[in-house]
Amino acid sequence: MPAPRELADLPYAEYLEPFDGRLERERLHDTVHVEGVEFEDADAGLARFTECAFSSVGFVGGRYRRARFNDVWLHTVRWVGADLAETDWLDAEIVSGAFAGVEAFGARMRRVTFFNCKFDSVNVRAAALRDVSFVDCLLRDVDLGGATLTNVAFPGSTLDGVRLEKARMEKVDLRDVAGLRITAGHDALRGAVIGSAQLLDLAPALAHVLGIEVRDR
């Protein structure tokens, strides 16, 4: 697993221009560096961010529905109560980020890596994740119901109270998680890879889902 990049490591770093401070609906942002600002209740739905960098930025509330983030780098960025539903993420790297009370249902993520990020009460229902990695992250009370996960890994991450009802998995690797507590949707683990020790921990819940009664004489 590669280490997170620094700002200077980005292939477009030398072309970045300072952000002008305005977020608007449907606006195109190309090769800009957003640094040290906080946006409160902004409306940037359908906006596009291409080859952009975000450093120490806060998004509090606000509407970003159907925005597109292509080839972006985010470091120490906080999203609190924001609407990220149906957003599109491609070739993104998020480092030391925080997502709390975020609506991200229907989001599409491809070739996205999260490093040392925290997710708390995030709604990712019906999202599509392909080639996504969560490295040393904490996912607490995250709802992945109805989501599609393809080639997704969680090395070093803790999944605490994750919901998986009707989720679909293919090549999802859970062997290297630091903790795994699923509160609903154990049957959605079909298509995931787990370790033998994890199987023992999950056995009671899996038996319940399959209608198997386990009891000793």
Image (cartoon, helix red, strand yellow):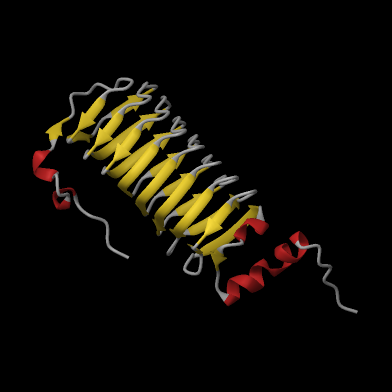
Residue 209, located in which quarter of the rendered image?
Answer: bottom right
Instruction: Name the quadrant of the N terminus.
Output: bottom left
Q: Residue at x 35, y 24 (%)?
A: 44
> Quick check: 159 above or below 97?
below
Residue 97, x across and y down, in percent: 36, 45
Q: Residue furthest left?
A: 14
- Residue 187: horizontal and vertical position, in percent? 67, 58
**Quadrant of res 214:** bottom right
* Image position of 72 (left or right of 163): left
Q: Exactly how many numbered labels are in the figure?
A: 0
Q: Residue furthest bottom?
A: 217
User: x, y (%) of residue 193?
Assistant: 54, 68
Q: Is residue 143 left or right of residue 31?
A: right
Q: Is residue 33 above or below residue 141?
A: above
Residue at the extreme right of the image, as rendered: 217
The residue that appears at 65% across and 73% down in the rendered structure is 200
Is 122 left or right of 116, judged from the image as shown?
A: right
**Quadrant of the image containing the C terminus:** bottom right
Residue 186 or 57: which is nearer the viewer? 186
Between residue 150 and residue 35, name the one nearer to us: 150
x and y, in percent, of residue 23 in the image? 28, 23
**Taking 170 as reference, is 214 left or right?**
right
Q: Quadrant of residue 189?
A: bottom right
Q: In this picture, is 71 found above or below 175?
A: above
* Nearest the eye: 157 or 111: 111
